[in-house]
Amino acid sequence: MKLFSSVNDVTDINALVAEALKLKQNPYANQDLGKNKTLGLVFLNPSLRTRMSTQKAALNLGMNVMVLNMDKEGWALELQDGAIMNGSSVEHIREAAAVLGQYVDIIGVRSFPGLKNRAEDYNEEVFNKFVKYCGVPVVSLESATRHPLQSLADLVTIEELKTKPRPKVVLTWAPHIKLLPQAVPNSFAEWMCKADVDFTIAHPKGYELNTDFTQGATITHNQDEALAGADFIYVKNWSAYEPYGKVLPGNEDWMLTNKKLGITDNAKVMHCLPVRRNLELSDEILDGPNSLVVHEAGNRVWAAQAVLKTMLESL
Amino acid sequence: MKLFSSVNDVTDINALVAEALKLKQNPYANQDLGKNKTLGLVFLNPSLRTRMSTQKAALNLGMNVMVLNMDKEGWALELQDGAIMNGSSVEHIREAAAVLGQYVDIIGVRSFPGLKNRAEDYNEEVFNKFVKYCGVPVVSLESATRHPLQSLADLVTIEELKTKPRPKVVLTWAPHIKLLPQAVPNSFAEWMCKADVDFTIAHPKGYELNTDFTQGATITHNQDEALAGADFIYVKNWSAYEPYGKVLPGNEDWMLTNKKLGITDNAKVMHCLPVRRNLELSDEILDGPNSLVVHEAGNRVWAAQAVLKTMLESL
Amino acid sequence: MKLFSSVNDVTDINALVAEALKLKQNPYANQDLGKNKTLGLVFLNPSLRTRMSTQKAALNLGMNVMVLNMDKEGWALELQDGAIMNGSSVEHIREAAAVLGQYVDIIGVRSFPGLKNRAEDYNEEVFNKFVKYCGVPVVSLESATRHPLQSLADLVTIEELKTKPRPKVVLTWAPHIKLLPQAVPNSFAEWMCKADVDFTIAHPKGYELNTDFTQGATITHNQDEALAGADFIYVKNWSAYEPYGKVLPGNEDWMLTNKKLGITDNAKVMHCLPVRRNLELSDEILDGPNSLVVHEAGNRVWAAQAVLKTMLESL
């Protein structure tokens, strides 16, 4: 594997999930593979879980890790081809990516969307230019439209904890006060659509995701209907795809509570974190027995380690 | 040891000091202990000595280290239980701490006081919530009211360099222009009160420390009287405990000079650093033969290594 | 070698270049040398290439690396001797440097010039105080007036790729919109003047470099004349030395283009990066077959590794 940016980069998602769960049982068995190999983690945006879990995964594999907070420690990047660079950007992504590719064996890149220009975001201009110019394998640490390490960890969590062969999984929109990307729901949807689960998406009218990510999913605007009989509920806010990057008024009653949980089949509750308590998810759920959010975050290590191991094997 | 937040977490301070001095002689002897173990250092505030010395201590023990500048690289933390998170904080400390505990074996946390609400600071709300929710052993990298790695290094330094069995140690207040916490003097006092030293605290009226930390110490407002016959002088500014977080006018003449040093028994001069030259301590002392400040900072490594080694042994 | 701050610190530059090229062939052969040795990288300014390539070099040698962004993670430094520190600076460089020297075996320091006071910059006050007070070997990661790791990598690149025994190397000034230091051109000039090359410097009137760095170079204001027959062209902007730190109007036509490249002997084009496209260097050159900028940046690893190896051998 030379690129991990979406579910489409994975030949066999079941095998990758199985690998992650195997690594969880035996984290340090592959340190010869990573010896004298270096992972570069490049952040254009903040990160806690991805930053720490991906480092840990690389260390488990015996790799070295170098972290670059590009926005704070490096130089302001120019993205436009042909630009006359007489403004505030100091270095073109062509050089920055190519140079980083000289120093590391695998690069992880985080680059959030601007949420202003849909075409630019959905073309993944920053991430794709990084991939194009760096010349080494690249792992997405969340790009404008996807967060595949998160989705893999989510699927690992579902596989690890499911109590029936084909669980019902519901992605349900949640309220928020900020403008959030569609990356996590897009990515979760495209992974669930390929996984052996019964997958439903519930959201208020106007929050339809790009249909490229939701082929095969049941989609409803009725949250109660979606929750009925659910085994896993994935709670997440996102801004509208059309009109792009908008927050629609209302819908505060979409916050998941214990009462709504009562409709489900004692569903486990997931969230990618960070979560705004009592806005997206109530305290009672987050502190209750059905919450998987910390366990799920823990599985980020094994997801990243499975991806890095696969990449190391193909270097 | 599962927690290192104050002298009260240490069963035998003499044994811990002896361990630190032993590690100083043989820093790399315990690398099997730290193999595949990870230390996470979480900074909510700036740090130079603690950041570097604790990393070095962990590396000496064969550990991996991951550093997180929470304030700059992660997300703004919510501390209040029950908060409806519709403001500027992005992640609750409950999740942040619990998630970090998934990725590391030991966590170090630095969290300064706000110096506005005494009860909140002295309840150690941030530090204690981190301990409560992270689920792994925690080392204080300086909390609102204590800096135990500093105090252990200070005691190591005194034990290493004392020339009589029970030296006279004086903590003396120094002038400053900023509002500083009481963490270092509190901590130094509680360690000295348990150590085999003759301990005196000198400060202007109004700078009385919380008496929980000073049981057994001689306390005076007469600096000259305190300095007479001293073997070690610990210079430090702090703001008032009552009224909380205030700086009282005057007292500029409390800065230690060579003239005042003449009253002592050729005392060695200590300071936790950073120090404001010619405000807290004169150039002549810092650049003179009696200053221990750099040596003392060097001992931070062995203090941290003794604590981490003890924690690794109890994992 | 205890100090690497200029070409004058190197006994035999040809041997150092040969060492770098040998390490490029066999990067991991010297890991016993770096075992339990720690490199501290201290940044007072941003850095991408230097940050990453020097880390990588140290890791290749089996060293541990600790990075400190002094400006963001540590404390504001006071540089003046005798200062009464009652302003915004929190720690004197005397203590900061001395303390860091307690934690690491070799220190790298980056400190840009202020470009306001020439004497202060050319006295290298920050860098030299760091060297004076830290007590361990120091590598310059670019100081006010020199960038020797860059220049060594540049010479390594020329030696690696030259097709005649004594190539013609031209340093040519390029337009910019910001006020840039003279460190890279100074340093490149002093290295080329000692190397076995035919060295010419071309710049508009008013951009004369300090002659301490250019002894033996041919200097011209006629760019075309300089480019004629060139084998390597080193493109770089700098601000004036006299009057210090000024940008003179005009000279936009000094940007290197393919047309100008036609005058040369099919010269290879070098730049230290970051480069402002279509201001300093045209897209057509950077994306064309004559550009060495990425390859040259890659060689930063081997330059740093040769220097660190030499230092480790003399610890």
Image (spheres, coloured by chain):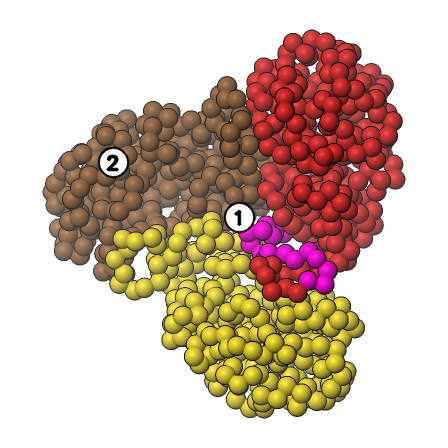
Chain colours: A yellow, B red, C brown
Quick one: A3 or A123, which is closer to the camera? A123
Asked if A132 appears above or below A256 in the picture, the reply is above
* Distance in Å between CA atoms under marks 1 and 2: 41 Å
Check disc 1 and report its element: helix, strand or loop: helix
Q: Mark 1, residues whose alpha carbon is within 10 Å: few (<14), some, or many (≥20)?
A: many
In-front residue for pair A282/A60: A282
Q: Is residue C181 visible?
A: yes
- The residue located at (48%, 86%) in the rendering is A211
Q: Position of residue A277 (x, y in %)?
A: 67, 67
* Residue at the (73%, 47%) spot, across then down: B120
Looking at the image, residue A116 lies above or below residue B236: below
* Residue B24 appears in the rendering: no
Segment tinted magenta in the rendering? B57-83
Q: Residue at x 38, y 72 (%)?
A: A117
Which residue position is annotated with label 1? C60
**In this figure, which residue is indicated by the disc labeled 2?**
C246
Q: Which quadrant of the view contains residue A293?
A: bottom right
**Residue A79 spot, x, y in % from top left:** 35, 62
Q: Which mark is residue C115?
A: none
Q: Earlier in the sequence, mark 1 or mark 2?
A: 1
Q: Can you tell which of label 1 and label 2 is closer to the viewer?
A: 2
**Tag 1, which chain?**
C
Q: Quadrant of residue B219?
A: top right
Q: Residues within 10 Å of mark 2 (few under 14, many from 20)?
A: some
Chain letter of disc 2 in the image:
C
Q: Secondary structure at mark 2?
A: loop
* Residue B7 image point, x, y percent: 82, 37
